[in-house]
Image (spheres, rainbow, N blue to C red):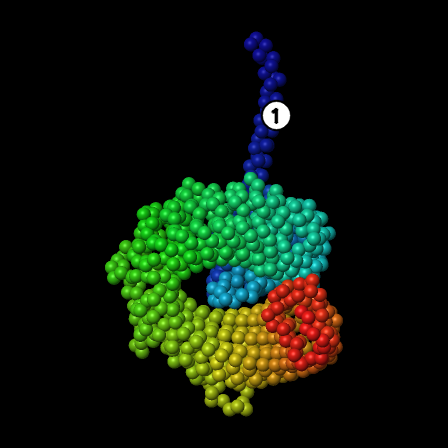
Amino acid sequence: MKNLHILIPLFLPALFLFSCFSSLVLSFSLCHAYLQNQCLDDQRAVLLQLHHDVYYAPNFTFSSKVKLWDLNTDCCAWKGITCDALGHVIGIDLSYKNLSGSLHFIFNLHHLQRLNLAANNFNTTLFQYEFDRLPNLTHLNLSNSGFHGQIPVGISYLTRLVSLDLSHQDSCYLHNYQILDPNFWYDVPFNLYQPLKLENPNFKTLIQNLRPLTELYLDSVNISTQSTKWCEATSIVLPNLHVLSLLNCGLTGPFCSSLSKLPFLSKLFLGGNPISYLPSNFLEISSHLVSLSLVNCNLSGHFPTEIFLLPKIESIDISDNYALGGQLPEFPLNNALRILTISYTNFSGKLPETIGNLKFLTNLDLSGCKFFGQIPSSTANPTNLVKLDLSYNNFHGFIPAFHRSGGPNLAYLFLSGNYLSGSIHSSLFTLPSLQALDLSGNQLFGAIDEFLNASSSLIETLSLGYNSFSFMKLDMFSQLKNLGLLDLPNTSLSIESNITSLAFPQLEELDLNSCNLIEFPEFIKTQDKLVFLGLSNNQIHGFVPNWLWKTTLVGLDLSFNAIDFSTEFPFGDANSSFPMLSYLRLRFCNLSMFPELLKSQNSLEDLDLSNNKISGAVPNWVWKKSLRYLDLSNNSLSSLDQFSLNQSLNSSQDSLPRPVCNLSNLWRFNASYNKLSGPIPSCLGNISSLSYLDLQKNNFSGSMPDFAKATQLNLLQLNDNKLEGKLPRSLANCTILQVLNIGNNNLYDTFPSWLGKLPWLVVLILRANRFYGPIKHVKNNFQDLDVLDIAFNNFSGQLPIDFFQATQLRSLKIGGNKLEGNLPRSLAYCKSLEVLDFGKNMIQDTFPFWLVKLPSLKVLVLRANRFYGPIKISKDETVFPELHILDLASNNFSGELLI
């Protein structure tokens, strides 16, 4: 301590310097922290202008001002806004806000790196925006935001992009097809709306500078003009790609083998494109995949079994490829699969017992296939399985015994539409997570009372109809307190009077179709939450009681009953509470007039009055603008609207505002099998949402409407009318048209080879018209046709040698024309052919021995031609293995028939 006075002079300067340095560091830190929380004035001004220019628009008919942020706070702290250390805005996330308005000021934020505007309603063109002014963008998400039109070339200059999402997803159309008509078997693209398109720039131009891209989502962007060029461009330009999603883009043909050059590709989604078949090196392309989706791609042939065993694959969805066959392999332990969906394919065989080795599986959907045998017992112990759907197959035997401990997470179990027998095991109702159970459409029998002790049951949905259960009392379901949907069609049902007790669960959906009921069940009086009620195909007769009209009711099906409606209908009272129906089915109800209850139903979307005895004109108040599905078929209607009855035959009805033209949202319209006359309203061809139009078996005259705007048309049936003129060339714009039937009219035109480019066309019927001339330009066209009927026209000349090579063609009818020459040898490639009719032509050829090995041919008609020579076939050959009808009459064959 004695030398302390020497050290103090040396220590004090150092202490002073340290103090100054600490103060400087602290001041800099505070200043830096302050700057981090304060965006720059110019950035704030841009955001304020953006806030001014956008508004809340949950739909296209309502909008209001929106307050996105507290404008009194620092803009870097605003929700969805990210700034860098210097106060520049580098991130904007305004997703899921239902916004509309102008976005021009965003493009003044030149430091922006992430822009997310997903799930909004901007309802404007994207081409107007200058994306090249945002050179620092790395992530751009504009999915489901209401943008439409051409994708701007400016996006191709964003050379730092890592993720690009311009997709649009909407699956409601496919669900509507299945709900509205389960018997309508033609598959449709699951998304019929393509708001954005890539033409100029095209796909290759868009991605040519985006080399860093790892994620590309262009679902429902129309790039149909690119053929397979998209594939080659992707392989060359985007070597770092991990995710490629091109769902419903109008792509045709197979995707190219060069996709195997993408070493990091882990997710591949190409569903909704008619790519038809897989490349030969598909296994190599898939070797690194984690997720694969090829839903509804019109695939055929055999799916490689090895794909299911790839070490990294976790999700496979190849559903809705009806001609795609295959089998499931023996699964090893610790397979990585979590989601396996192969529903509505041609897969067959028995399910391997080793399917129980899929311990990570959460979703297994094998519905709508051709699997058979017993359901493996290993499926009853699904550790992680949440959904098991084996419905609509050919399974037989007993339902496996599910145990509470074996399936702790199983929430959805669907086994409907099989041949399962025996009684329902009580263990089913002890599964702790079970919410939905569908056992309908089997051969189950016995009593159903075991589940009454399932006091903790979470079951919300229960479907047991179309089985052979013994007599069933409705009150047995009263202990299922969470029950919201109860479907018991085609059961022997007893409804006790005391079921009106409030203890019965409050249902939202009740289906008692085909239950031999003779009156409206009175327990419905206490069902105050009922949304859908099905009572069709019973023996109910008389007036519909007023208490049936629940204010909650949205859907009602009273078809196949002899009912009537009171003239003192409660809807007439403006002060009374009444339902606003969305769904009303009154088929086969013996109605002689349109029910007046329709006058007040301004929210009606689905109306079916088919197969009644309604005559005269359709009242103007039937044509609700809200209608999406309208079926008036099989009545005696004479006019689609009242005023047209008062018009002279020489007046132009299209010059007047017809009520039928109010149906701007119409998706499906059926007025077939009536007595409708006059011209078909031209406005039907202007309904952009129209997908299904059936006006067959009427007395319509004049020319066909122009369909330039009805580009979503999937089925058009105008056969058996009195239509004249030419086939409208605008049908070439209907790129998803699958069924065209205009047979039995007076149309006068040449062969419509221009229809051959429609990628989804499967049925073309032109029979019994006045088509004329040679049949040309068929090769490489009409590649997906199932049915071609051009019989009884005036076609002439020789058929091309390569006339047809469509492997899936099932029926070909060309009889009753003036065709000459030889029978085209290319027909030997039509391996699915079942019906071949060339009768009543002038074909001059020998017997087509080269057809004898067609495996499915059932009908062969060559009558009334100029075939000649002997009919000799080696006895060692398999000759027409499935043939039922052979008509060779009125030809010049000679010798003995040696078949």
Side of 541 relative to 329 (left or right): left
Which residue is pictured at 56% across the width and 54% down the height? 348
Q: Residue lying farthest top?
A: 2
Of residues 293 and 230, the one nearer the viewer is 293
Query: Which residue corresponds to mark 1?
Result: 17
- 487 lies above or below 678: above
Of residues 805 and 851, the one nearer the viewer is 851
Quadrant position of the N terminus in the picture: top right
Which residue is pictured at 31% across the width and 74% down the height? 542
Q: Position of residue 134 (x, y in %)?
A: 65, 53
Q: How crowded is mark 1: few (under 14 residues within 10 Å), some or many (20 or more)?
A: few
Residue 198 visible within the image: no
Q: Residue lying farthest front?
A: 896
Q: Position of residue 889 (x, y in %)?
A: 65, 79
- 459 lies above or below 857: above
The quarter of the displayed image where residue 590 is located: bottom left
Q: How many numbered markers are drawn? A: 1
Residue 720 visible within the image: yes
Q: Where is residue 115 in the image (x, y as percent from the top left)?
A: 59, 52
Side of 695 relative to 588 (left or right): right
Q: Position of residue 340 (x, y in %)?
A: 55, 50
Of residues 622 and 853, the one nearer the viewer is 853
Kind of element beneath mark 1: helix
Which residue is pictured at 52% across the width and 58% down the height? 368
The quarter of the displayed image where residue 771 is located: bottom right
Of residues 405 and 338, the one nearer the viewer is 405
Which residue is pictured at 38% across the width and 68% down the height? 536
Q: Which amino acid does label 1 sit on?
A: Leu
Quadrant position of the C terminus in the picture: bottom right
Side of 527 relative to 225 (left or right): left
